[in-house]
Image (cartoon, rainbow, N blue to C red):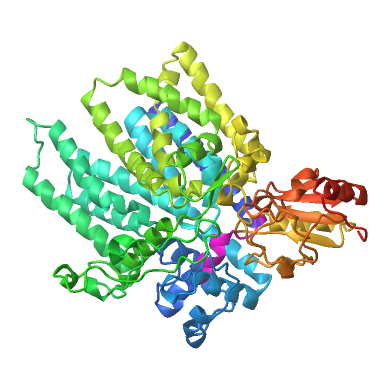
Amino acid sequence: MHGNSGRLLCGAVTAIILVHLGLLVWGAVQHSPSLDEVGHLPAGIGHWQHGRFELYCVNPPLVRLVAALPVLCTRAKTASPVEWRDVPRMAPREDSSLFPTQLPARRTEFAAADYFLKRNGQRSFGYFTAARLACLPFTVLGALVCFRWAKELYGAAAGVLALTLWCFCPNIIAHAQMITPDAGATAFGVTAAYVFWRWLKGPTWAWTLAAGAALGLAELTKMTWIVLLGLWPVLWLLWRWSERGNLGWLPWRQQIGQLTVILVLGVELINFGYGFEDSFQRLDAFTFLSSPLTGKPPVVPSSATLSGGSAAEGNRFVGTWVGSLRVPLPRNYLLGIDRQKWDFERRQWSFLRGQWRTEGWWYYYLYCLAIKGPCGTWLLILLALTEGLRRRGRVAAWRNSLVLLAPAAVVLALVSSQTGINHHLRYVLPILPFLFIWASQVAVAMESAHGKTAVLAAGALAWSVGSSLWIYPHSLSYFNETVGGPTGGPAHLADSNVDWGQDLLYLRRWLVEHPEARPLGLAYTLDVGAPYTLVDPRTVGIEYTLPPVGPDATSIDTSRTPDPSGPLPGWYAVSVGLLHARTKQYAYFTQFRPVAMAGYSIYIYHVTADEARRVRGESGVSRTDQR
């Protein structure tokens, strides 16, 4: 019987993962590259071909190195060594408020992206699809660790529950089909935490080496996980404290040695991942941008336009004894941390519930999780809290929960403290698997048929999965029922939470089916407030002109538009990000009813002469020569 149960469990796990992979493959084929993806792929190719890591240094290179591998086996046109040296001097279509011209601060990966897309044209989409498929093993790893950790904590049913929450979570589905580092960081982060937990339970040298390797891989996916270098020693001390009087079979001195090996091995793997590029340089040899490392107050742009904001470069350690110390990290890893901190200091515009501000909200990510996480999942977490309180008296239970939840709590606190940029739920994506595993303990109640709890848990799981699949394949635009789903979400959040350029191919398919929608005015953007995108719609055969901007528009270049006072009759497709943009250049489209949508991020309008005349009149704009 036990053998039959094992085979049944293995079959269920395999089936769930295969369905998950099927969802990801279809989504990877259907969606156009997102903003960050267009920078990651050429950066990853450059890492392999030229052994340089300055592009996209704000994220470690592991995920894009893997993503670039299949593209290196194709005939993709990439930059030669001579051309690569010219990438920083290329002229990408940048908003100067976002990409200052000072070379140390400039995001040159988008110059490389522009170069790659222009050189390869429509073939680029196939290369991005291949790169996406190469990253699917990351999500399989995350799924298996969720299953294994939950199973060891709460039983086989809990393992299947945690696995299901991972595989059908709309936010996991959305990001696991991309080559951005968020899903990879989420998978490797929970893997590292699980292996460390196993080492705490049985501190053998095998688990020591495994924990060090897992730590290094997590650090190579996203810099968020640098918190583990400080968190793990604290968790070890608390675990040891819980065992006072029963030291176990290894002396505490040997465990200190093993913990040191874990941390050192993790750091060494960071260096290995960068090919030891400029590792162990003197601290005073760097030029920094962020205030903590320059020792200068941050240069904050004008709150009205966020223009200016050039970097105050420097190094506060020059001329001190600290400056003579060798940094045990690659040069671009440290500069990436510095650049990211500088980004957070610049008070960039953030959007929440119809309000734009430059100082952010401490509760921004809690709010994101609340409305972009399925309601069924949140109900399971609440039920798990009840179950956890029931088991609170057990030492093993509280310390297991501490090791499980501490990484999620620390990451959430760290990211929430950086209110200079409140843009993306994906910044807290790494906390989700820990919540899934925690929530899976309700399976204990389900297995023992605890009446109402079991019924509620089963219903909550069905609600979570059903809500996600109802919106699929548009998982990036997912919002739960509390805000009206994906059509209500744009009034609450912006950027990659709803509109990241993912629906361009859906627009092309709609236009093929509706040839009457010509000529087309298209405002398709990946950066709210910028009337351009790195992925030119003409690449996929969409001919268009920019729509006229509205009379209330601010901070725009009217020379790029046919008319500065819109609206005019005709067919238009407008990115939902621009409908709610701070600059209001296309806000007048909210007064029309869209006739269709491409995904949930591009609204399609057919404006008649009467409708245009009505809205122009309401706006106080008169025009006698409407077309």
Name the image quarter holding the C terminus.
Answer: bottom right
Image-quadrant location for residue 550: bottom right
Q: What residue sits 48% from the left and 40% below the top?
A: 166
In the figure, residue 410 lies in which quadrant?
top left
x, y percentage for residue 36? 53, 61
- Relative depth, front residue between 621 and 563: 621
Left or right? Give the position of 489 relative to 88.
right
Q: Seen in the image, is 102 located left or right of residue 523?
A: left
Residue at x-position 23% and y-position 46%: 232
Residue 294, compared with residue 471, is above or below; it is below
Between 88 and 122, the residue placed more toward the observer is 88
Name the residue located 61 percent from the left edge and 47 percent from the top edge.
498
**Quadrant assignment for the N terminus:** top left
Magenta stretch encompasses residue 12? no
> Residue visible at 92% across and 48% down?
610
Question: What x and y, as percent, mark residue 544?
Answer: 79, 65
Q: Nearer the viewer, residue 307 or 442?
A: 307
Tally of numbered discs:
0
Residue 107 percent location from the top left of the image:
48, 69
Magenta residues span 30-42
Q: Can residue 280 be seen in the rendering of this structure?
A: no
Establish if 66 lies above or below 240: below
Q: Is residue 152 left or right of residue 462?
A: left
Where in the figure is residue 96, as x and y percent of width and height?
55, 68
Q: Is residue 305 visible?
A: yes
